[in-house]
Image: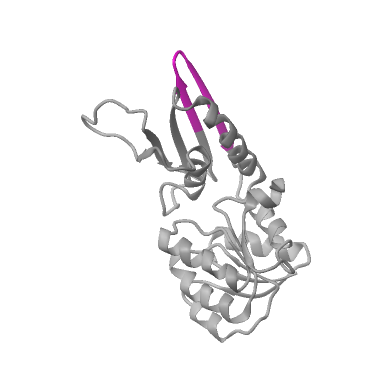
Amino acid sequence: MRYILIGRGKMGKLIRETATAAGDEIQAAFGHDDLDQLGQLGKAADVVIDFSRPEALPEIAAYVRRTGTPLLSGTTGYSPRDLELLRSLGTAAPVLWSANFSLGVAVLYRALQTVSGVLKPDFDIEITETHHNQKADAPSGTAKLLVEALDPQHALRPVYGREGNCGKRSREEIGIHALRGGTVAGTHTVHFFGPDEELEFTHRAASRQIFVNGALHMARLLPGKPCGVYDLQKILFGE
């Protein structure tokens, strides 16, 4: 496989090392300081892999539209407008975006879809996410992903932390809390608080390698697929 990598952060470096060790070729790699050079490149790879920042999306989108190169993105922090632009690229190439490419998180997402329907509205739902002290966005993309699994109809109101005389908790809210410190790769816990009982689902990432392995596995599936926006859950579970 031949890749173009966008992003020179920790994830970008791990993807490069892992792909190279597997015998894949890195045709080009760009960071925020030289991303404008992507526009000078023709179709040079089987897949563009993007783990960068939302600001890079317009340049990446222009390249994908021009060359039809499949895009796999794990960038987080996108605005609704960014996501709309990302999905529009499905008319030009196969596109797969996920806030988390871990198999364990994919299974957790699936489990929460089933469990939340049984426990709501009798159980209050809160999410805590913990990451290293260098993470720039909050809440994490994975936390947002889990909220989508829990509340696909957006019936619950997100509450990001609480302070002062904030009043009683209502059943119509879902708490989302971000912790930052040390070198934590990523821990996400979904809490269900019911009458006289509690239920928790926790996923802990021991390292970023799980995200890298998942992303590269999915990237190998994109070439040859028809243009469109692909869903990680549908690819994994076949629905």
Residue at 52 percent of width and 68 percent of height: 88
Residue at 21 percent of width and 29 percent of height: 165
Q: Nearer the viewer, residue 118 or 199?
A: 118
Query: Image quarter for residue 79?
Result: bottom left
* Residue 198 lies in the magenta stretch: yes
Q: Please provide the residue range marked out in magenta.
A: 190-203
- Main secondary structure found in the magenta portion: strand
Q: Residue furthest top?
A: 196
The image shows residue 60 at horizontal and vertical percentages of 53, 73
Compared to 129, does 134 lie above or below?
below
Q: Residue furthest left?
A: 165
Query: Image quarter for residue 126?
Result: top left
The image shows residue 152 at horizontal and vertical percentages of 49, 43
Q: Nearer the viewer, residue 217 or 64?
A: 64
The image shows residue 47 at horizontal and vertical percentages of 67, 70
Q: Quadrant of the N terminus?
A: bottom right
Residue at 63 percent of width and 76 percent of height: 68
The image shows residue 70 at horizontal and vertical percentages of 65, 70
Q: Nearer the viewer, residue 98 or 207?
A: 98
Compared to 5, does 119 lie above or below?
above
Residue at 61 percent of width and 46 percent of height: 207
How many numbered marks, from 0 up?
Answer: 0
User: Position of 162 compared to 226: left or right?
Assistant: left
Residue 59 visible in the shown view: yes
Residue 79 visible in the shown view: no
Color encoding of the figure: one colour
User: Position of 209 compared to 53: left or right?
Assistant: right
* Residue 83 lies in the magenta stretch: no
